[in-house]
Image: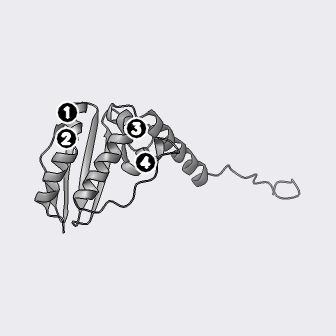
Amino acid sequence: MFTQEEFAAEVARQFQFLESEYGMRREPMHAERGRAWIGFANAGVKVVVEVEDGTYISVTVQNLRHIKRDTLERSEFDLDEIVAASGPRQPRRQDLRANREGVAKAAEALRAVGAPVLRGEFDTLHARQLKAVETLRRHDNPPLQNNEPENGKRR
């Protein structure tokens, strides 16, 4: 099992590039009910690396400057979404086990394909998300059907 102290040390080591290359500052580790997370942030972007129940690692990147236009919009994207938006040649990441290798793989994936979002360029992700919201809206609100009887006469 990956302890919170091991998690904190490994995240500090593997995600150090966020501080040196993107001017982010590392926040102290937070922990509650089997979860622990560490944030890295600058004026426009926040990265959160989390371990839950000592088993899996997750990484999310948040656009701190995004203004929601729809209640279904999000300003936070997980590593899978970032990898998928980076192009068809990028393989989806595997489940990231909570160990040194899992943290290293998460950092490597974010560093390899996340440069645009880490610089605050979220246009591709927001466009994909907006398309999903529009699809959901169309599905939830089908066009009104003609309420006329079959013979065309009103009752």
Is 66 left, or right, of 31 in this rendering? right
Q: Amino acid at mark 3?
A: Lys
Is 105 left, or right, of 25 in this rendering? right
Q: CA distance from mark 4 to mark 1?
A: 24 Å
Which quarter of the figure has residue 74? top left
Q: Which residue is mark 1?
A: 20
Whichever of callouts 3 and 1 sits on the residue coming sooner in the sequence is 1
* Residue lying at 89% horizontally and 57% vertically, measured from the top left: 151
Which quarter of the figure has residue 54? bottom left
Q: Which residue is mark 2?
A: 16
Q: Compared with residue 31, is residue 137 higher up or lower down, i.e. above or below?
A: above
Q: Which mark, residue 81?
A: 4
Coloration of the structure image: one colour
- Seen from the viewer's position, the closer of residues 67 and 115 is 115
x, y percent for residue 106: 31, 51
Give the residue at the far bottom of this rendering.
Answer: 1
Whichever of callouts 4 and 2 sits on the residue coming sooner in the sequence is 2
